[in-house]
Amino acid sequence: MLPVQYVFHFSNKMYQKSLQKRLREFKQAEDHYAIYRYNCAESDLETISKEVAAVYPLINHLYRFKPQGKIQFAVYARKADLQNIMHLDTENTPMGIYWLGQIHLLAPAAWIAGAEEERNCAFRLLGPVAHEYTHYVIDYQTRGNYPRWLSEGLAQYTEQALAKMPPFSSECLLREDYYTLDELEYCFDFLRDQPLAYLEALLAGEILIEQYSFGYVRKILQELKTGKGLEEILYCEKLNYPTLNLLLREKLAQLRKNFAQSLVET
């Protein structure tokens, strides 16, 4: 076993063990695909379970991924519960988090207003299941050896393909800022403009798919599993980071130009 694979398995195993202790007061349920620890309403758990059943086979097929066991979910009734378990600040609590083999989700009722039927519909369109499960797939396929921007880009690409709606905010199209791949790779969580960081990650992922194919992306993930770096893998295909940076900047500039033109026309 390669060192990166050993660290991956050891880290995930230790985290799962620690998390089970912290979630010992939660109820537990399981279906064909997943094991859920939850403190939310049964109706919310049913909504999540249905969404898992809908996206699980589609994402597995897209990435040619075969899980070795059931996926572990923790579902929280309140933002405070998620913040406490994951040690988050109180300003920006995400709908979902993937971390070391575990998917953490806020129950739909915690962030979607309206009747149950309306929440179910909104959760299908906006919910984090596809996004976080894609992180899970990429993490396990590469044994944790991937740059953050690649995982975020592919997770957004996947959820966009399934939900048929753009996952990014148009606000960052009104600005002129730009991040390099090195900034995305080493400083992602600390970048001032997070919507722009996520948008650029999505665009970079799209460039890889457009330049080659999604099959090539699957090949990249398999090579990352061997311990190679992404820049080394891309260099073999004559798509080095400077070239990818240039393509990313051009794609972002064109997107901003198109957006500005649409504002003029309306």
Image: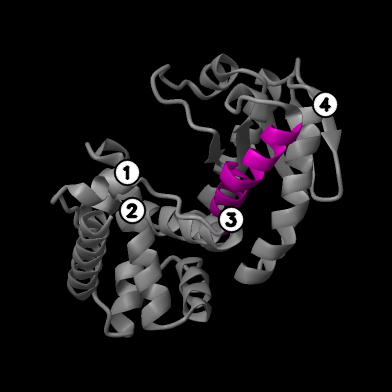
User: Residue placed at 47% from the left, 73% from the top?
Assistant: 217
Kindly tell me whether residue 107 is visible in this rendering.
Answer: no
Circle 1 sits on which residue?
195
Give the label, 3 or 1, closer to the camera: 3
Question: Dot 3 lies on which element?
Answer: helix
Q: Is residue 190 magenta?
A: no
- Distance from the alpha carbon under mark 3 to that under mark 4: 24 Å
Q: Tags 3 and 1 in contact by the CB under 8 Å rule?
A: no
Residue wearing tag 3: 163
* Kind of residue sitting beneath label 4: Glu
Magenta span of residues: 117-138
- The residue wearing badge 4 is 42
User: Disc 3 vs disc 4: which is toward the camera?
Assistant: 3
Residue 15 picture location, percent across and down: 59, 34
Along the line of sight, the residue nearer the viewer: 46 or 260: 260
Q: CA distance from mark 1 to mark 4?
A: 33 Å
Label 2: state its secondary structure. Answer: helix
For marks 1 and 4, the one nearer the N-term is 4
Left or right placement of residue 23 versus residue 216 in this view: right
Q: Residue 199's mark? A: 2
For residue 257, which quarter of the picture?
Answer: bottom left
Q: CA distance from mark 2 to mark 1?
A: 6 Å
Callout 1 crowding tier (Cα within 10 Å): few <14, some 14–19, many ≥20:
some
How many residues crowd mark 4 within 10 Å: few (<14), some (14–19), many (20+)? few
Q: Answer yes or no: do the residues labelled 2 and 1 have beta carbons within 8 Å?
A: yes
At which x and y percent is residue 106?
61, 29
